[in-house]
Amino acid sequence: MPDKPKIGFYWCASCGGCEESVVDLAEDIIMVADAVDIVFWPVAMDFKRSDVEAMDDGSILATMVNGAIRTSEQEEMARLIRRKSKIVIAYGSCAHMGGIPSLANEFPRQQIMDFMYEGSPSVVNPDKTRPMLSVKHNSMNVTLPEIRNLVRTLDQVIDVDYYIPGCPPTPKLLKDAVLVLLSGKLPPKGTVLSPDEALCEQCKHKDTKPVDVSFKQFYRPHMVIIDNTKCLLSQGVICMGPATRAGCEALCIQGNMPCSGCFGPTSRVKDQGAKMLSSLCSNISAKDEEGIDAVLDGIPDPVGTFYRYGLASSLLRKKIPEDV
Amino acid sequence: MSDNNNKLNGSPQTNGAAVSNGTPKIGFYVCHCGHNIASQVDVEDVQKFASELPGVAVSRDYKYMCSDPGQELIQKDIKELGLNRIVVASCSPLLHEHTFRTAAEKAGLNPYYFHMVNIRENVSWVHDNKESATKKAKDLTRAAIQRVFFHKALEKKTVPINPDVLIVGGGIAGITAALTIANAGKHVYLVEREPTIGGHMAMFDKTFPTLDCAACILTPKMSAVKSHPHITMWTYSEVEKVDGFVGNYRVQVKRKPRYVNEELCVGCMECIDACIYKEAKYPDEFNQKLSKRKPIYIPFPQATPQVVLFDPETCIDFKSHRCKKTCIEVCDREAIDLKQVPEYKEINVGTVILTTGFKTYDAELSPQYGYGRYPNVYTSLEIERLVNASGPTAGEIINKDGIKPKSVGIIHCVGSRDQKAHKWCSKVCCMYSLKLAHLIKEHTGAQVYNFYIDMRTPGKGYEEFYDKLMTEGVHFVRGRVSEVTDWALVPEEENKLTIRVEDTLIGVVRRVPVDMVVLAVGLEPRVDADDIRRMFNISCSNEGWFLERHPKLAPVSTFTDGIFIAGGCQGPKDIPDSVAQAGAAAAEVLSLISAGSIELEPNTASIMEDHCSGCKSCIPLCPYSAISYIEDSKKAYINEALCKGCGTCVAACPSGSITQNMFDDEQIFSEIDGLLKFAGIELEETEGEHA
Ligand SMILES: Cc1cc2nc3c(=O)[nH]c(=O)nc-3n(C[C@H](O)[C@H](O)[C@H](O)COP(=O)(O)OP(=O)(O)OC[C@H]3O[C@@H](n4cnc5c(N)ncnc54)[C@H](O)[C@@H]3O)c2cc1C
Ligand code: SF4
Ligand code: SF4
Ligand code: SF4
Ligand code: SF4
């Protein structure tokens, strides 16, 4: 019997939800485990970096990497995985577009450190201790990876072949992706493995969306009781559905929550947030500056709303102080 | 002229996107425009710079690219060097894009492989530093050259022109246009809101500057309209709905009920005499409410059509159904039909002329002049009716108390040239004030004072008319009137209206007591101008006048193909100008009709049906209502013939499912990329920043 194809999973700057989604395959995981050899999966099995280094270059068929790239170690691992894998798949919003961790790009690294180690009300640190790249401890040299200036997407660090979107991706997308890999009928490089149309297409509320939404006021979900029979945008709740790639089968909307955009844009859009903004703002009912401002005041955190999962991959400038 | 011939360089990064028409072979031409460009931009330097850019096969500079030899240069190169892309750096595309596209087309190249860089309006005319201007010209050039890589061959669409014409508004402008077009053998639908055509001109007794009788010159035209075999005249009617695009408009017209059959009524007016009301009791609108009419009436003796109508608000039978209906009894033609209902007509036309005219300023909004408070303060339109032989007083100028005024003050610029009302000059009121001064003096022998800020009488024979008035003993006081008051300070002011004004020629404040005051109210857009312009998809200026496509070169065209404007709806103007514009609009219409078809610019947007999610975000945004939602497919659809290529929907589609010819993403991004190269910025930048 020929060797089963080798598959790896790895995580970088992520919350662990993506790993959870693999387990969510439920009984299908047995199908996967039967069909492939999982050669590397730190979250579930004990692997050391040296184990990977020992593998032949290109010997893994595909590795799914979740998480954004924030530290020097993640960067090194990503490069190592690239060398060892024929196919690298960015798995989940963080690897795909930066994800929630990349909202940190709104602030300079120094400011984040100051807050986390001193400013935060729950921190007591009179000695102003900070993480060090290397420390002598009991005559041993202990090192820590370096935190980079920016959070980056996986493809800003290494060459990426495919993307599986979502925060986290649905088990169905993962299963479909594995089946595609096994079939050998690979789509063109760079493909996002999810339908290339916007979510409204899959949404049960599509028919109730009015032609002229004409926003008079925006509400955040906690401010209103959302009518679960009507398009959320028509109720003034910002739903990212029109600007977000389909594939989740409108899970959030089924849970009576608006789409927050985790699947990213369609292939035809460079900047998901800008697209949503331009569509939303052109449909505001007020036509004078004052009126428009009043409506927009209903969106207190525009970056967190429109770029929640994609700040690293967006066109927005990153905040880096002049002196670094 | 310097040359840099035949230097084929490698192609730039094409970002993996396909280019059409084979490997790009670009011809670049930079124009001196005499000294217009060359004095501020080192054109030879730009020419050399371009010659070294990837894809450029030939780069030249020339004194006047738009001249015949300039165009021939391009054509020769296309033929001899096999160029398949052309970039010209010269003036604004508004001016010569068409010229160069046509030149390229004549040499066998699809005209949309041409692109223009504006280094005159955007560079040489707005910069005074030659070095940086030249640098900017180069950046713009590089952007254009990178862009044309992605140009595609496009085909213009042709649509046929339905030869029938709709004219909305039957004032002198609409009448003139209708007759001109109908005389050319084309069918005209003339839709007028009022019960009669004629507009404002029908209210006047005489017209400046020749003082010919308005009725004598207008009524023959009105009856010509009525009897013309090629004109369908619908009075008391309004356009309800407009769909379609140039050459193919579908229009719905509502014919309001007159309660009198237009075909049967011959205008004998016996019904009016027979009306149960022996005395006329209701304010007569046509006479500016200075006289009374009955519930059944005809606006004025020469009204066209000569058909009476009912006012259901005042007719007893409409209220209580208990009138004896003596009117019906007397009409032996059985023309009266109290059960009439609105009638809706659907017509197809290829072109439209809007001639909806203007309204006059509401004088009560300037309370300092006392209109509405003092009975003897009149508007100019009221005086037009008073001096009119068929008006409320049969041409006698008398105050409301029946007394002939011995002194009359005419106040100019009421509602015009006034920061609190309208800023514009209404253009006709100086002249009609002079006309009224003459007529009042002629009819009453009164002392007439004209209070003006500036006397504006440009026009053929107009200044001469003013001169003539000065010899007639009319008084002219230069200054803005501050107040009209009945508060007498001296005995001569008792029982009079006193006009307080600073006479700026002698520098004193004067009080002039008069018996009658005439307010020369200005012209303003009609109340429903905004609804009308929306219905016909045209634009308005800030003030609310219908907006012409170009103030000098396309004064009767609009930004919507096939819709033209003429007369007072476009801005204040007098009868000669209204008539001239009407003629111009008729000529535009006839030229479209005789061409038989029109080519549409292919810069239209289209929706990729497979990709559209049907989110409907784009639909309300289109200023030309070109997008609709298809219920069957649950997707949006753009009617290409309606799309003007404004790009709004393209930018707004949140799923990126709309593309626009000539503005593909790759075209725009490669252009931006070319533009930003000067700063060392690459579009596809990945942030490798480390601590
Ligand atoms: C007091 C006064 C005196 C003047 N005296 C002179 C003069 O002596 N000599 C001179 O050259 N000029 C004079 N003018 C200017 C003259 O009135 C205008 O130049 C002329 O009337 C413009 O004609 P028009 O057809 O564009 O507009 P209008 O005369 O306003 O006619 C527009 C027509 O369109 C109709 N209409 C409007 N909206 C609609 C609609 N939605 N649907 C259907 N129909 C509609 C109206 O009922 C009207 O019949 C004077 C103006 C004023 C106010
Ligand atoms: S906007 Fe949101 S709720 Fe409305 S149809 Fe689209 S996905 Fe559904
Ligand atoms: S035409 Fe004469 S009266 Fe009319 S607004 Fe102009 S200046 Fe005033
Ligand atoms: S490009 Fe402009 S005119 Fe054309 S369909 Fe879109 S919004 Fe309408
Ligand atoms: S905005 Fe885009 S996705 Fe939405 S209906 Fe229009 S074309 Fe379709």
Image (cartoon, coloured by chain):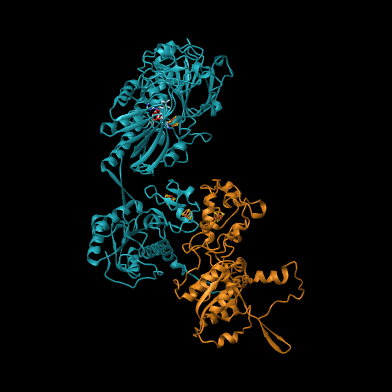
Q: Residue B215 sits in which quadrant?
A: top left
Q: Is residue B159 above or below residue B383?
A: below
The residue nearer to you, when weighing B551 against B582, is B582
**Image quarter of the N terminus of chain B:** bottom left
The residue nearer to you, when weighing B15 against B445, is B15
Seen at 72% across and 67% down, the residue is: A120
Q: Is residue B249 above or below residue B73?
A: above
The residue nearer to you, when weighing B477 against A16, is A16
> Where is residue A71 shown, x and y percent of the image?
61, 76
> Where is residue B385 shown, x and y percent of the image?
43, 19
**In the shown orientation, is residue A228 left or right of residue B18?**
right
Q: Which chain is cyan?
A: B
Image region (quadrant) for ligand 1: top left
Q: Residue B127 sits in which quadrant?
A: bottom left
Q: Is residue A193 above or below residue B161?
A: below
**How many circles with numbers are drawn on the protein?**
0
Question: Is there any visible trace of residue B233 in the rendered image?
Answer: yes
> Where is residue B261 shown, x and y percent of the image?
38, 21
The residue nearer to you, when weighing B514 against B508, is B514
**In the shown orientation, is residue A14 left or right of residue B345?**
right
**In the shown orientation, is residue B190 left or right of residue B690?**
left
**Image quarter of the C terminus of chain B:** bottom right
Colour given to chain A in the rendered image: orange
Question: Is there any visible trace of residue B502 in the rendered image?
Answer: no
> Where is residue B584 shown, x and y percent of the image?
31, 37
